[in-house]
């Protein structure tokens, strides 16, 4: 049973998260300030930390930095500040994903599922499908699936776990067109809580990070009335 540490000073939000996550079968622990969060993390060593950015005693960025210095546990950051996203996801902090408040519980559960799915890939090189974890280069874009790293024109690009999963899948199947529901099932899994429009939002986020002109994309192409594809000529 995966362990999740919920670090959120709003007791209502914390209780709501705990209730829904426990219904999904996760073992949940709570901390309501940054100092307690660090102490609890050391005590329970969770697979995933859901971490609010704004915390009393020690803010979420510092907690994230401390955890990342000690562990590779996944960190899902909750923030009300759009402008903090790049800092949160940067190497100096190392969060794996983020959600902006107010957020959908359904989508949060789906993101937790994706992160914990990756945590079970202890040694991808030993996997019977190890080939899917080999590095990929497409033009000026390079992906390392094991490290979840993306480099574009020699510069590292910080993607969330879901953005990386989607990009990796599209590149492995470049030239093929996928409907929204196909992408939902592939990225979030069967019986997902996520709506079709979540794919559109994820595509938009991804384009802003890997396209020279997100309004005129050359890599991730929309096939109107059908879905999306990664251009085989990109």
Image (spheres, rainbow, N blue to C red):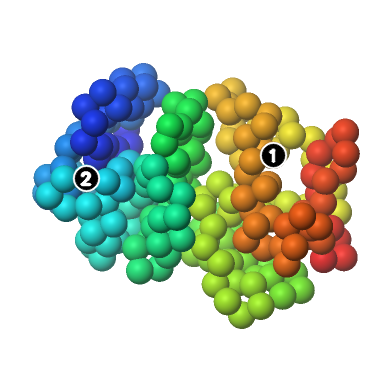
Residue at image coords 27%, 46%:
54
Q: Position of residue 199 (x, y in %)?
A: 67, 38
Above or below: residue 31 compared with residue 175: above
Residue drawn at the location 87% of the way across and 43% of the way down: 223
Identity of the residue drawn at 34% across and 63% down: 93
Tag 1's secondary structure? helix
Q: Which residue is mark 2?
A: 55
Question: For the C terminus, which image quadrant?
Answer: bottom right
Q: Can you identify the residue that label 1 sits on?
A: 200
Query: Farthest bottom residue?
Result: 154
Is 207 or 183 nearer to us in this picture?
207
> Residue at image x 30%, y 27%?
13
Q: Is residue 65 above or below residue 179?
A: below
Mark 2 or 1: the one toward you:
2
Answer few, some or many: residues within 10 Å of disc 1's Cα (few below 14, many 20 plus, some between 14 and 19).
some
* Residue 199 in the figure: left or right of residue 71: right
Question: SS class of the residue under badge 2?
Answer: loop
Residue 2 in picture, x, y percent from top left: 33, 37
Q: Earlier in the sequence, mark 2 or mark 1?
A: 2
């Amino acid at each position: 049973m995966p362990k999740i540490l919920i670090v959120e000073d709003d007791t209502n939000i914390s209780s709501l998260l705990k209730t829904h996550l426990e219904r999904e079968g996760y073992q949940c622990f709570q901390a309501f300030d940054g100092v307690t969060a660090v102490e609890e993390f050391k005590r329970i060593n969770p697979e995933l930390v859901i971490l609010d950015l704004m915390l009393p005693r020690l803010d979420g960025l510092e907690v994230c930095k401390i955890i990342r210095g000690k562990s590779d546990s996944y960190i899902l950051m909750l923030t009300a500040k759009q402008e903090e996203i790049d800092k949160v996801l940067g190497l100096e902090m190392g969060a794996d994903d983020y959600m902006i408040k107010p957020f959908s519980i359904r989508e949060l559960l789906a993101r937790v599922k994706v992160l914990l799915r990756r945590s079970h890939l202890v040694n991808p090189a030993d996997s019977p499908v190890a080939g899917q974890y080999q590095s990929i280069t497409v033009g000026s874009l390079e992906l390392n699936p094991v490290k979840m790293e993306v480099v574009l024109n020699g510069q590292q690009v910080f993607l969330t776990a879901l953005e990386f999963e989607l990009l990796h899948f599209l590149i492995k199947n470049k030239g093929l067109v996928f409907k929204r529901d196909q992408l939902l099932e592939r990225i979030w899994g069967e019986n997902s809580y996520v709506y079709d429009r979540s794919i559109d939002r994820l595509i938009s986020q991804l384009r802003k990070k890997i396209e020279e002109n997100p309004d005129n994309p050359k890599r991730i192409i929309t096939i109107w009335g059908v879905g999306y594809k990664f251009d085989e000529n990109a």
